Image: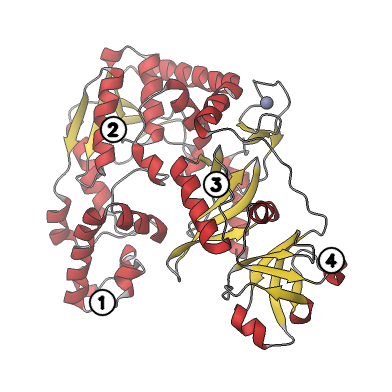
Amino acid sequence: MSVIHYILSENMKTYIGKIHLKWCYNCNLPILGKKCDICNTEALPVKLTPPGDARLGFRYDIDFINECLEREFGAKSIEDGIILLNKLPGNLEAYEVIVDGIVKYILYYNEEKETWKIKLKLHGAYDLIEKGANKRIVKIKNDLLNILKDKSTLLRPGIIEITNDIERGDDVIIVNEDERVVGVGLAMLSSNEIEKIERGKIIKVRFFNKNFQNRKLERYKLEEALNLMIEANNSVIYNYEKNAIGFIKNSYEKIKKPVIVAYSGGKDSLVTLILTLKALKKENVEVIFIDTGLEFPETLKNIEEVENFFNIEIKRLEAENFWEKIKEYGIPSRDYRWCSEVCKLNPLKEYLKDREVLSFVGIRKYESFSRAKKRLIYRNTYIKNQINALPIFHWTALHVWIYILKEGAPYNKLYEKGFDRVGCYICPAMELGEMDRVRKLYPELWEKWENVLKEYANKYKLPEDWIRKGLWRWKKFHPKDIW
Ligand SMILES: [Zn+2]
């Protein structure tokens, strides 16, 4: 990662807030408070990159990462149980994968190769070898064990043998003559190129430790682990809930306006809804869903499930037809997001035009740098009739997940398919990895969109990358005469 990345992370640390994530290495569970409520021992901090808004991994994520590991290293090393994914800041789609309370891998989308890849940490490499990894392995002479260190370079003469599957830019596992893991690094040359030469730089060593040992922790089946996680975080979640409900009650008494919750089908708005329904009388809360017309089927299904679960009626507001509006406004982009105005904000603005409301919103400061600066109660700048109040502003994604699981509330099943946010199935804010996921899981939805892009690309003679590399997401790559 670049220097800019590092500076960005440092800023995040300063502005967003402390990293809450700790671990009970006794029970092998994530802990958000000071101690584990099961065994009463003090929880220890998990080292992860700020802002540290790690989310819960579902079985899909475990399987997905295991498949990546098997493809690259020949072994599936993650046993069933709790894993967390911590998105790294910046545009690159990359996640620290936390297993047994430690970052073992980084999963990232390689835009050039159009595939998900793995960066290794020593702990992850150790697990892989233990599970029989047989690819991307470099065996080195024991003479080097006292010479190599973090960030050093491995030269050709130090290598005894290598597997024949290494390409330039791949992560490799470095083992000693006894086939114990001693390091991980990045291949500067391919297996073929390495075989042909006798000298020169081969591997950029990232981490090196000749005495490396992994801590072995017991792992539970995922369902059991989730229940234990709820129990281990009981007191901290209880306090978060109490504070949020207090905040909702106070805001309602102070502002004295009719209350709405705009439920989006996402996890944060689900928690906001649960809390609002607990704090206020059901008949005093109006729940609204804005249907952009670009919703995943899971989201629409979830709206019904939520209605049934809480025994409430959710008012659907429909947006103007996106596909028609494209003809008028052109392809939306990150710096030209007419779609969020037309499809998301306008229906609500129209609906609220004759009255003022107090709206409880599931914005969290850990989501982004710009969101971290919000006040807890403020007037919406676009919909002036709406006063926003943010009851879960200080919650992390893990607080949100533990609370949802504890309440047994119906969450959107998209989260069980590798999506870490829920919104329109096409959006210029998406990264290539997300779009790749939509393309694979919902080919018919994706195709409809791609056909629109193709039509534009043909008409204006745009290069292949305009679609393939997602250049349509920025206005500067759009033909001038459209605007
Ligand atoms: Zn414990």
Q: Position of residue 450 (x, y in %)?
A: 23, 63
Q: Position of residue 469 (x, y in %)?
A: 36, 69
* Cβ atoms under marks 2 and 1 closer than 8 Å: no
Q: Quadrant of residue 327?
A: bottom left
**SS at mark 3 in the image:** strand
| Residue marked by disc 4 | 145
* 452 shown above or below 282: below
Q: Position of residue 79 (x, y in %)?
A: 57, 43
Mark with earlier residue (3, 4): 3
Mark with earlier residue (2, 3): 3
The residue sitting at 28% across, 32% down in the picture is 302
Q: Is residue 472 left or right of residue 85?
A: left
Q: Is residue 83 left or right of residue 173?
A: left
Q: Nearer the viewer, mark 2 or mark 1?
A: 2
| Residue marked by disc 1 | 462
| Residue marked by disc 2 | 302
Mark with earlier residue (2, 1): 2
Q: Nearer the viewer, mark 3 or mark 4?
A: 4
Q: Quadrant of residue 202?
A: bottom right
* Amino acid tagged 1: Leu
Residue 53 visible at all: no
* Cβ atoms under marks 1 and 3 closer than 8 Å: no
| Residue marked by disc 3 | 86
Label 1, label 4: how many angstroms apart (C-alpha)? Answer: 53 Å
**SS at mark 4 in the image:** helix
Q: Nearer the viewer, mark 2 or mark 4?
A: 4
* Amino acid tagged 2: Asn
